[in-house]
Structure formats: C-alpha cells, structure tokens
Image (cartoon, rainbow, N blue to C red):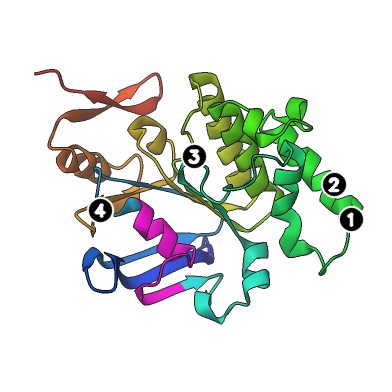
Amino acid sequence: MRMAKPVAISAYHISASLGSRKSQHPVLHGVSLAVPTGRWLSIVGPNGAGKSTLLKCLGGLLPCEGSVQLLGRELHAWGHKERAKHLSWLGQGGAGADGADDLTAYDVTMLGRLPHQSWLSPPSDDDHAAVEHALRQTQAWGWACTPLGELSGGERQRVLLARALAVNADVLLMDEPLANLDPPHQADWLLLVRQLVASGKTVVSVLHEITTALAADDVLVLHQGRLLHCGPSGDAATHRALEAVFEHRIGVHRLMNQWVALPKLN
C-alpha cells in the first residue's frame, strides 16, 4: 500500500483583508489547501482573485484569520530565522530587492544564506558554494560581479530566483516568477522547478501563464477570493474549472503530450 506523503504547507479556512485600518476590504474568504512534500501547486485565477494575497498568507507576510502550517507546525510558532531556513520567498516584480541595486548579483544571492549564518559571521564555504550553485542554476553566474541595478529585467529576475534557491528551503513560494523572462528562460524555469520537486522540495507558484501552470502537479483555481477548485492538473474537472473561471474564453487541450490553454477566438 502506497503511503501518503507528509504535508509540507497547508492552510485551513484562511481569510484576509487589504487596505487601511479604517477601510479594509475582504480579499480571501475561507480558503483551505494542503500541499504534500515533493509536489508543485500552481495558483491561478483572474486578476483580483486573491492569488498573491493567498501566497503572502502562506508565507506569513500578511496577517490572516485561520491556520497556516509549515511542515506540520503552526506558522506563527516558528522563530523568524528558523522559518526562513525552511520557507523561501520570491516576490512579484522583484519585491524584497528594494535598495539592492548597488549590490552585485553575487551579494544579492548571498542574502538568501542569511538564515544559515550567525550574527556578524562571514559567509562559510557552504554559503559560497550554495550561492555559486544557485547562480549557475539560473544561468546568472556570468554577471555575478555586476550590480543588480545594471541588469535587465529578465537578468534581475534570474538573480532574485537564485537568491530564493540559495536558501535551500524545503518549501519555495514564488509570485509571478516568469515576469520579464523570455520563452527560453521560462522553459529553463519550468525544468528547474521539476528538478526541485524531484529532489523532494515543495513549490507553490502564482502564475498568469495557464499553460505553464498546467505543467504543475496540482492547480488551485481562485475566483473572487474563494476556492473554486483544487486538483491534479490533468483532471477534466480541473480543466472545466479553469475554463469556467476565465468565462470560457480559453479552452484546455492536449497538444504534443502536454496540456495547453488556448484562447477562444469566437
């Protein structure tokens, strides 16, 4: 009998609001999910569905009602540094890199190793090895000594991805990781994620690219802050939910041994 994989990250009935204290508006409404170890879950939905808000709640970056657990332990029970060793974050549009333009790509990637370092201690040999490996994984090693501010949008995105990888966390949360990447590097990202998952890592991504999202193990479909569907990417029910949430303006089809989402032109 095949044993179920342990859950890497989960949420139970979480709700969240955005805005000022005087003017809050609900964004998430009682969303629950569970992502097993060694799986890739993609979160999709129309603009304003609450995708990024859900990911921020999973990462502990936004307060929410309900329960979020990392590796079977309540997220709020983790110490900040210890949690940062096990949960890595890649924000939308390079979020988290503000003020880093003068740092080299190498130094930015080294920031991912901070949870593993003692206060004021220099980077160890393991830290340097992890940084080089991450930069090579994202094909960014060639500009390791270049300041972040001198890089193109796609190059910058690959460095920030390297920073997230350098943590060597069990769970990686990625919000619009394909932003500014050209098609070949989008394909590289997809291959990299599959390698991470094969090695036992867990990935949760927010994606606008529905065809890429369908390459994930599972797809979670959000609509107006509510969970519409969550299931394997190859299931017909998942495809029906995707088509419905986008008002049947796309169709999911099998093409060259993969699922693709194509626009309906009439």
Element class at badge 3? loop
Residue that mark 2 sits on: 128
The residue drawn where x is 64% and y is 40% is 101
- Which is more foreground, mark 2 or mark 4? 2
The residue drawn where x is 35% and y is 58% is 53
Q: For mark 2, does the 10 Å Cα neighbourhood hold few (<14), some (14 to 19), or many (20 or more) residues?
A: some
Residue 67 in magenta stretch: yes
* Rendered view: 68 above or below 251: below
Q: Nearer the viewer, residue 142 or 40?
A: 142
Residue reaching furthest right? Answer: 125
Which numbered disc covers residue 124? Answer: 1
Q: Are marks 2 and 3 in contact (CB under 8 Å)?
A: no
Q: Earlier in the sequence, mark 2 or mark 4?
A: 2
- Where are the magenta residues, as a range? 52-68
Q: CA distance from mark 2 to mark 3?
A: 24 Å
Q: Are marks 4 and 1 in contact (CB under 8 Å)?
A: no
Q: Are marks 2 and 4 in contact (CB under 8 Å)?
A: no
Q: For mark 3, does the 10 Å Cα neighbourhood hold few (<14), some (14 to 19), or many (20 or more) residues?
A: many
Q: Earlier in the sequence, mark 4 or mark 1?
A: 1
Question: Would you say residue 245 is visible in this rendering?
Answer: yes
Residue that mark 3 sits on: 177
Residue 107: which quarter of the image?
A: top right
* Rendered view: 177 above or below 154: below
Residue that mark 4 sits on: 229
Q: Are marks 2 and 1 in contact (CB under 8 Å)?
A: yes
Element class at badge 1? loop
Question: What amino acid does circle 4 point to?
Answer: His
Question: What amino acid does circle 2 point to?
Answer: His
Residue 154 in magenta stretch: no
